[in-house]
Structures are given as C-alpha cells and as structure tokens.
Image (cartoon, rainbow, N blue to C red):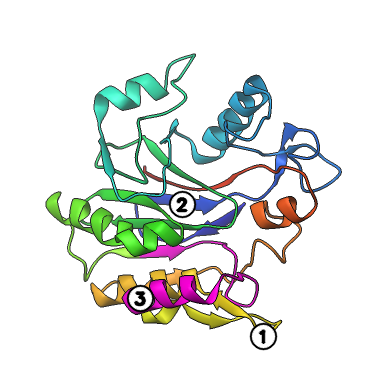
Amino acid sequence: MHPVDLGDGVRAFFTTGAGGVSPAPWATSDGGGLNLGLNVSDDAARVATNRSLAAERLGAPVAFATQVHGDAVLELGAPERALWAADHPPASAGEGDALVTAERGLGLGVLVADCVPVLLADPEARVVGVAHAGRKGVLAGVVHRVLDALVARGADPARVRAAVGPAVCGRCYEVPGAMRDEVAAVVPETFATTDAGTPGLDLPSGVVAQLAARGVTAIRVERCTLEDPELFSHRRASAAGTTTGRQAGIIALI
C-alpha cells in the first residue's frame, strides 16, 4: 500500500499487487495477489475477498465502477454506501470512469494496470473523487469532468488536492507515431520518446498538466507499472502471453 496525504479527514492510498489471496498470474510475488479487478479471469470469490481486505485497510466499504475508457462521472451518496456496506455488495456502481461523493465513510476505487489512477479531495468542502485516465480518457478530458463534478459540490480548485498514481511511464509506453501525435495535439505534455527511441506517450505528465491547467497541484507517485514488479501491468503480462490483476487508487472521507 502506498498512502498519500490529501488533507485532514481524508484517507487515500494506492494498492500494489501483493497482500491478497489470488494466485499467479494475479499475484506479483510468492504471496497472494491483491487483484481487485473482476474482468481478468480471476475467481470472483477471491476478488471479493481482496476487495474486503482493501476496505478493511481503508476503514470503509469501497465502490468500484465498470470502466469503459470514457469521461462519465458517477455520483454516489448514502444509498450507495448502504449497498456497498452490505454482506454482498454489488460488483459495480455503474458504467463510468470517474466517481465522486460527499458521503462520509464511502470509499471510491479506481482500477488500473497501466492507465493513470487519479485521486482528488477538497477537505474543506468535504468532497472526494477518483478518475481512470487512460489514453482515451486523457483525450476525452475525464480529469476535467471529475473536477467539474467536485466544483458542482462546493469544491474550489485552489483547495483541491490530487494524487496521480503509478502508471506506465513515457519511457515505456510505446505507441504508433500517429497515435502520439493525436494525443499530443490535445495534451502536449503527453509527447514522449521511449528508451528505445520510438514514439511514446507520457500519460501521467499529461494528467498532471490537465490538473495544473485548472489550478490543482498534484502529488505524483513516480512508479512505472511496466518496470515495477510489485505492480500489475497489462502490457508486461501481454508481452509474456498471460493475464494480470488490477491494483487501485482508493479514497474516502473519514
């Protein structure tokens, strides 16, 4: 677990691939893997146990969305907290790539295995959010949409604290040249060249720039999912001909 400080009354952290009950290939070490994703062929009962373990570490139930690489924001409140605190919580809060809540004691989770997990909080306005920012999400402006939702609930961008979590870095994220140009035309800070000298995308830098454009300063966790064996990486697993799990960014008002 990698905790981040997003202010008083907020608990936030990024999980790693360890500390759960899933076996290989949904584990990053000899111990059990903390795979939190349901769409990677892991046993649903194991994923439910892993999600319970993450909720125990947070001290609150954690809601997850069905992520589709878009910009839709789901707003959760007291009814959703009751659902996710039940003995058999739902698998998903709905289809979307961002979640916001002003409900104390309801965790929000964003699942990743190379894409950028973003956690946001305004401790004074008592509202938090998460966003899943992959290439398509960065292009669609999912970070802007979740900020809009926070502001609509009283947040001030000047007070918002953000954390940009582990993701594949620009040195490793190789893409076709035309794809790099398409994304960089919208978010110039994503333009990158890999260590191999090929076109690349630096999505974490792009997200940091999008936040900065709204007046939000972000903590950036400098860990590359492809390079770090303690983290799940879809690209690393695909290159090896296997599957992998999903880690998460998790936040709650406490």
The answer to which of 136 and 86 lies nearer the viewer is 136
Other residues around mark 1 within 10 Å, as few (<14) / some (14–19) / many (≥20): few
Q: Position of residue 204 (x, y in %)?
A: 48, 70
* Frontmost residue, 198 versus 134: 198
Residue drawn at (63%, 31%) of the image? 50
Residue position marked by numbered label 1 in the rendering? 197
**Label 2–label 3 contact, CB within 8 A:** no
State the separation of the CA atoms marked 2 and 1. Answer: 36 Å
| Residue interval drawn in magenta | 162-186
Residue reaching furthest front? 178
Amino acid under label 1?
A: Gly
Neighbours of disc 2 within 10 Å: few (<14), some (14-19), many (20+): many
Mark 3 residue type: Val
> Mark 2 or 3 closer to N-term?
2
Mark 2, mark 1: which one is toward the viewer?
1
Q: Count numbered badges in the picture.
A: 3
The circle on residue 187 is: 3
Residue 132 visible (yes or no): yes
Confirm whether the magenta stretch covers residue 128.
no
Q: Name the quarter where the C terminus is drawn.
A: top left
Q: Earlier in the sequence, mark 3 or mark 1?
A: 3
Label 1: state its secondary structure.
Answer: loop
Dot in front, 2 or 3: 3
Residue 97 pos. (x, y %): 37, 46
- 130 displayed left or right of 27: left
